[in-house]
Image (cartoon, rainbow, N blue to C red):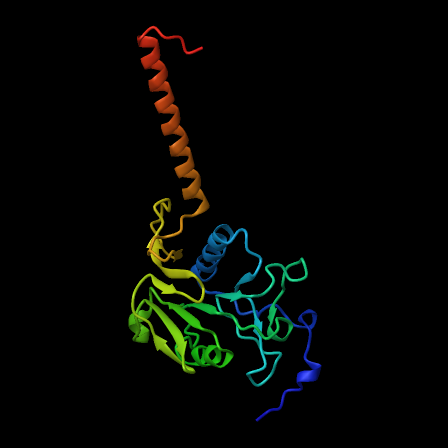
């Protein structure tokens, strides 16, 4: 087995940000970015988390610390939201106090990437608590379900039942939905609360606030009209 010199590991400045493998469908970027944007709202007052999209995770459990694993998305807790006040070019575990992601996401595409074997084993060795595999188009080809969440239990992954799946270690649930505002009616992934209610997007929140403001104004207008009908001045 190849020995890794833990005292002379490369820094993040010396490592590329990914494996430079292009995605072969837009969902591989769109879906994890949507989860990231939702987290920016849900956890807007927290600075102890990081969500990476198509970013290399460098670790010491493989053949070389210079070879990353690159999930479509991943979430780490207990790390700086902004590394040293700036942005990360990659996620280097030995610069993150060996904090492994608590969740990784793979979106299966036309080009099969070993999501159910090779990457599953990598994430198991890293100690990733939840591994989400989203496979809406090729699940029959691969002999799996369209949406699967594996949880690390006693050193091995166990397929979880239920959707949305509540993840107490994260304080979030994850599942599929179709956003009412999406004119393409695309199925996406979203975060859910402990009651199984989907967290709304910022656009949806804004629409609700506008509706509330309009309703309040209508009630005021009705009240003023009633006062005028009674001969009462609104001044």
Percent across and percent down for residue 128 are 47, 74
Q: Residue at x 48, y 60 (%)?
A: 29
Does 235 appear above or below 44? above
Q: Residue at x 46, y 68 (%)?
A: 103
Does 84 appear above or below 21? above
Q: Is residue 83 left or right of residue 211?
A: right
Q: Is residue 219 left or right of residue 57?
A: left
Kindly indicate the quadrant of the structure image that contains residue 190: bottom left
Kindly indicate the quadrant of the structure image that contains residue 142: bottom left
Q: Is residue 19 visible?
A: no
Percent across and percent down for residue 150 are 38, 73
Does 133 appear above or below 7? above
Kindly indicate the quadrant of the structure image that contains residue 55: bottom right
Question: Which one is nearer the viewer's eye here, 188 or 103?
Answer: 103
- Looking at the rendered image, the quarter that the C terminus falls into is top left
Question: Which one is nearer the viewer's eye here, 18 or 128?
Answer: 128
Percent across and percent down for residue 180 are 34, 46
Question: Which one is nearer the viewer's eye here, 143 or 87?
Answer: 87
Question: Which one is nearer the viewer's eye here, 178 or 201?
Answer: 201
Q: Residue at x 53, y 75 (%)?
A: 69
Q: Is residue 133 visible?
A: yes
Q: Outermost residue, top direction?
A: 231
């Amino acid at each position: 087995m190849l020995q890794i010199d833990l005292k002379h590991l490369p820094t993040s400045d010396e490592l590329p940000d990914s494996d430079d493998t292009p995605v072969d469908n837009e969902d591989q970027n769109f879906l994890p970015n949507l989860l990231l944007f939702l987290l920016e709202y849900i956890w807007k007052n927290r600075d102890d988390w990081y969500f990476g999209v198509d970013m290399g995770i460098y670790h010491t459990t493989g053949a070389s610390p210079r070879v990353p694993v690159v999930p479509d998305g991943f979430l780490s807790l207990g790390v700086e939201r902004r590394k040293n006040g700036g942005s990360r070019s990659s996620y280097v575990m030995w610069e993150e106090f060996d904090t492994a992601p608590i969740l990784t996401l793979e979106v299966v595409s036309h080009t099969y990437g070993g999501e159910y074997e090779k990457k599953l084993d990598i994430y198991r060795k890293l100690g990733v608590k939840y591994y989400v595999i989203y496979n809406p188009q090729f699940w029959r080809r691969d002999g799996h379900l369209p949406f699967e969440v594996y949880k690390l239990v006693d050193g091995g992954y166990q397929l979880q039942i239920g959707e949305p799946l509540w993840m107490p270690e994260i304080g979030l649930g994850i599942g599929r939905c179709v956003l009412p505002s999406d004119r393409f009616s695309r199925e996406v992934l979203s975060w859910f609360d402990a009651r199984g209610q989907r967290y709304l997007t910022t656009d949806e929140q804004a629409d609700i606030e506008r509706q509330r403001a309009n309703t309040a104004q209508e009630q005021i207008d009705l009240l003023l009209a009633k006062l005028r009908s009674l001969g009462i001045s609104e001044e």
